[in-house]
Amino acid sequence: MSAPTKMALRFPKGRFAMLSVYSFTGAAIVASTIFSLLLFLSLDDNPLMQWLFGALAVIFEAGKFYAWYEFGERRAHGNYVGALSALAFYLILALISIGGSIGGINSATNAAQSEQRQAQAQIDAYNRQINAIEQQITLNNQAAERYIELDRIATGVARLQKENNQLRKEQQQLALERDSLPAVAQGSILGLISNLANTLGVSADQAQSWLVIFLSVLLDVFAAFFVGVIGEEQRFRHWYRHPHATPPTPVSTKASPRANEIDTEPTSPSEVPNEDVDSPYADIKAALAAKTLRCSKKAVIAEYALSQEAVDTLFTHLQQQGLVAKKPNHHYHWVG
């Protein structure tokens, strides 16, 4: 598909669309860079080494997205060998970035789980103390029954009842302290991990691993997609503003391979087409004279994949030479 045909399909994206694209791209790149920094900064405690590793993470992230942008540029210009090399470079850096994202997201998830475990541990400690008191009260009741059987109510049972009353007070105090603790809030990510584990029938650790890998890959794919959108839009805007520039993608036609020989088009109707032997305009003139090509602008455009303006210029030049005339119904016919 030629550049004029592409421009007929759509127009350049508006300001709001491009602002959204740049915002999404910037947010994804920043998030990916931060997660990579979390991994690289944890490699060493020396401040100098942390600076070096941090700079390395930023370089890897910037190089990764530029490699993806370069892949799109080279593929659009038909440089498939260069596009493959850029793609290979991007994949290597993307693996490093995904590893950093996995480490960063996993670290944040583990921190949330650690806080929840600590809060739950405090509640479990209170529950153990309450259960221990309950067991002691049960033993005292059994001992009181034994004293009753031995007719020693005055000496044993009264003492045990007093001790049980004191234990009940301690049990109630512990329950009040336990209930006054801040509620253990389960974050959304922890709830998602729990639901995934129940749905997939796996452990929480396995569900967390799969979720972290999925989010890391999704973040890189998301950023790469919008970087590709920016690159495609830049190329399209160039073609839109320079409609006579040779499009970077190869032009395919259904009728004749001679369309691929077109390198330049006249930029204004006043220019005279080049009529060298190797020029497509010479081929068009010969085809029209031999009646092998219908004397019509649409036929010439379909056969040679020229722009509308180039064909208008050609027919104007042929009219000036007296080779083509226009009928009353505005159709052309060959008179040369």
Image: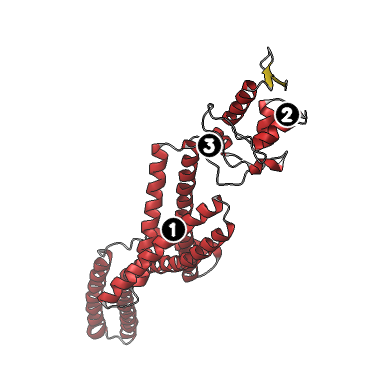
Q: Nearer the viewer, mark 3 or mark 2?
A: 2
Which residue is nearer to you in this view: 35 or 62? 62
Crowding around mark 2 (Cα neighbors within 10 Å: few <14, some 14 to 19, many 20+) is many
The type of residue carrying mark 1 is Phe
Name the image quarter holding the N terminus.
top right
Crowding around mark 3 (Cα neighbors within 10 Å: few <14, some 14 to 19, many 20+) is some
Q: Secondary structure at mark 1?
A: helix
Vertical placement of 296 versus 58: above or below? above
Vertical placement of 278 versus 336: above or below? below
- Total number of numbered labels? 3
Task: Locate residue 19, reporting x and y percent.
Answer: 38, 42
In the rendered image, which residue does mark 2 sit on?
Answer: 288
Q: Residue at x 66, y 16 (%)?
A: 330
Task: Locate residue 22, reporting x and y percent.
Answer: 39, 47
The type of residue carrying mark 2 is Leu
In the rendered image, which residue does mark 3 sit on?
Answer: 244
In the rendered image, which residue does mark 1 sit on?
Answer: 65
